[in-house]
Image (cartoon, rainbow, N blue to C red):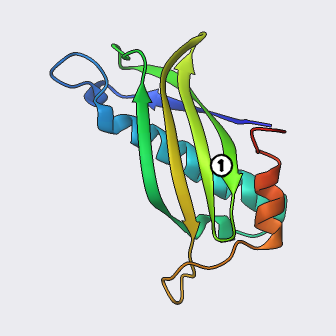
Amino acid sequence: MKYLNKQFVRWDDLDAMGHVNNAKYLTFAQEARFIWSTSVFSSAMNASTLIEMVVARAEVDFFEPIYEGGRFVDVEISVEKIGNSSFVVLYTIGDEGKTFAKVKTVQVAISLETKKSRPLTDKEKEFLTKYLESN
């Protein structure tokens, strides 16, 4: 299963080259991940612990520029791998059959009390498993 979110491309996302600035793709991924981890996870599990995570790594592959603001792009989310205290999230940013970019982040679950990594709960792993690429 994949989660699909629409992100709005703002006119100020465009840079001097006339296309969406590279850093904005991470913002599109972050905003989609926030909605997925709060709304979808919270509804499914009646808890909000999946938001207790930090990005340990982020990488972006760019395929085609986005040249216009004032429009929406699709951000499709899936999970590549689930570890003990971390998981890898994949994002495909595109629209109408075009892939603009692919993003990958490594998320680490943290304890808000200790500010250190913590193991993923069984509920979190169960939720993430639904989005595994192989499913």
Q: Residue shown at 62%/79% (left/top)?
A: 118
Query: Label 1 sits on what residue type?
Result: Trp
Toward which corner of the image does residue 64 lie, by quadrant? top left
- Badge 1 marks a residue whose secondary structure is helix
Q: Nearer the viewer, residue 81 or 70?
A: 81
Task: Judge left or right: residue 19 versus residue 57.
Answer: left
List the residue tagged with mark 1: 36
Look at the image and tell me in which quarter the C terminus lies. top right
Residue in view at x 28 percent, y 29 percent: 21
Tell which residue pokes out farthest to the left in this image: 16
Count all numbered tags in the image, as a single digit: 1
Looking at the image, the residue that sits furthest to the bottom is 114
Residue beneath the point at 57% across and 48% down: 33
Please provide percent x and percent y for residue 54. 49, 65
Q: Is residue 100 left or right of residue 34?
A: left
Displayed quadrant of residue 5: top right
Please tell me which residue is depicted at 68% across the width and 51% down the height of the picture.
81
Q: Residues within 10 Å of mark 1 (few under 14, many from 20)?
A: some
| Whole-percent x, y for residue 30 in the image | 48, 47
User: Taking 26 as reference, is 135 left or right?
Assistant: right
Rendered-image quadrant of the N terminus: top right
Percent position of residue 43, x then y: 79, 57
